[in-house]
Image (cartoon, coloured by chain):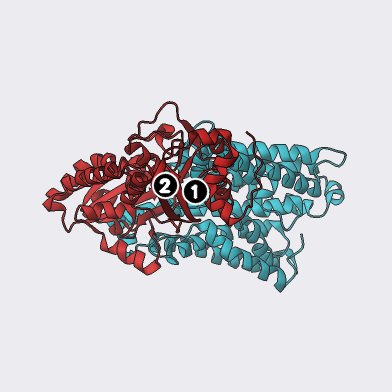
Amino acid sequence: MLHHAKVLRTAFLLVSAAFVAGACGADAQESDGLALAEPVTVEHRFGSTTIEHVPERIVTIDLQWTDTILAMGVEPVGYTVDSFMPDTTVPWQELPSGAKAMSLDDGLPVEEIIALDPDLILASFSITDKETYDLLAARAPTIAGPPSADEVTPWQELVRTAGDFLDEKDTAEQLVADVEKTVTDAEQPGLVGKTFLLAQYVVGDGITMVADEKDGSSLFFNALGMELFPPALAEGRRTGATRAQVSTERADLLAADLLVFLVNGGDESDLADIPGFDALPGTVAIADYPTVVGLNTPSPLSLPYSLEQLRPSLQEAAGT
Amino acid sequence: MTMAATKRSLVPGLVILAVAVVAVALLSLTLGSRAVGLDAVVAAARDYQSGNSDHQVIANRLPRTLAGLLVGVALGLAGAVMQGVTRNPLADPGLLGVNAGAALAVVCAISVFGITAATGFVWFAFAGATVVAVLVYAVGSAGRDGATPVKLALAGAAVSAALTSVTTAVLLADASTFDRYRFWTVGSLTGRRLDLVLTLAPFIGVGIVVALCLGRLLNALSLGDELARGLGLRVGLARAGAAAAAVVLCGAATAMTGPIWFVGLVVPHLARLLTGPDHRWILPYSALLGPVLLLAADVLGRLVAPPGELQVGIVLAFVGAPFLIVLIRRRRAVEL
């Protein structure tokens, strides 16, 4: 049923969007799932959202949520794809064929999402403005990302939230335990105290490195007992930024015990632009885009994948 | 002042500028995010050791410096020629749509043909620049008076605006192309390979020789079309030939580094300030001032934000804009 909602409703209407959707749409009423024993309230960038029913038609925006929902054994009715992925597919996902893949290239596809008649919309960072959020939240309970745009929600928190609103708390705890075990199984005494660095060379421009010990990727290496390469940490503290820009002439700033490196916009032959790269003292892992994304915005599915890709390098770094 | 006297007083300036070019080139080899001494540069030149990381850094600065020299000369000359041909003091090499054409061609190369290597899309940039310049010239030449400066400027502005909208439309619809394109469009001398520089060098070389010979012709054109015709000049042909030289220079430069603004605009003004209105002197002065400005800006960009670097295009925008304003305010820009 076409429902020409006035976009700007009162805050009250927005917060109780679930009721509004239920009351206005005949279809929506059928798809209302089981009422949750205790409603789940999630704080996010544009306020807080309360989920009252177990959702049955979930749309996931951004990888982290798609992964989390899939890992919980639920199929989304629609999900967004990352067009930078080779062939736009994520190697660690097995997506249901019935679900609608949506591109973010032209911005968030609000109409496509609403056409899927969702009863829950989940996003990490691609809902970037209040107006878009309001459009979505007027149709279904919507969870936007964390308050700060460059913050990454820990994957454990996503899984536990999903466990709450799916009424599958035990499954969630089990999943967290399983994935954490996969990571800790990769722990090796040789890695403890070793330094790590995640960086990329943007071909023809310069190097960007992660300079924040609380970044999603840093947490993964921390779990293995490793420490962020001190020069990178110092640079991050000096500038207050989570990413530091480095000239191609400063290979000395890449000399961590383990360097995970992405060549962005080129191939390994472009490493010749960085004098001294071939003589770096530590273990150098040239990673592909999915592996780095899997570390950068970790999910219960991406972490085991990225870990598997890095395993040989981790072993090498531990051995030295 | 007699012609001979003018010449005598302007020759030392050329020598000083030539020395300045050598000096900034040496600075460009010596200064950077990683400090290496001049002695290391000398040592690397005498006996290059591929295992020495100081030597590797210097070796990597060599194509970058060469690119800076070539692009600086090319843009300085192209700007001087373009301002002369169109008798428009605000003309820069982009006026004939060269940058807009190159940009659209690069976007098509990435988006449609999936070409992402710089050595691949330089040819698109070059071809795009040429085709669009020819198109602008054809549009500007239509009508009774042929290619007058005003019509050329209007046609260039209109075609540039149209092409830029197409480029923007493609980029909006194609995020992955945008990701590649944005690094090209910022204008940078980083990571230019020697093979890329050497591939484009012959075009710039030919352009330089042709442009330096245009002094007399541009002087005649600056008298106005009627007088120039009176002097026996075939105005349309002269204008087209001179514009072609500028397009080759600017197209090759843009293909090498992405669009770089201000050099082509500011350098001819500086040159005229030193030489007066004689194009036989404006052209060689512009050819030497261009690389001094471009390389100095590049070196500055390496030093201001350690351990990162600022792209030369951004430094030029910061340095060039106020510089141009001062230049115009200090005295009325030397009339064309």
What residue is pinned by disc 1? B183
What residue is pinned by disc 2? A203
Residue A132, percent across and down?
57, 48
The local secondary structure at tag 1 comes to: helix
Residue A14, percent across and down?
56, 51
Specify whether B315 is left or right of B141. Answer: left
The local secondary structure at tag 2 comes to: loop
Specify whether A241 is left or right of A179. Answer: right
Choose top left, top right, bottom left or bottom right for residue A236: bottom left
Q: Which chain carries label 1?
A: B
Residue A142's place in the image compared with A228, above or below, is above
Residue A50, percent across and down?
46, 51
Please state which amino acid type lies under the numbered disc 1. Phe
What residue do we see at 62% from left, 68% from top? B323
Q: Mark 2 lies on which chain?
A: A
Query: Which is more toward the observer, B316 or B40?
Result: B316
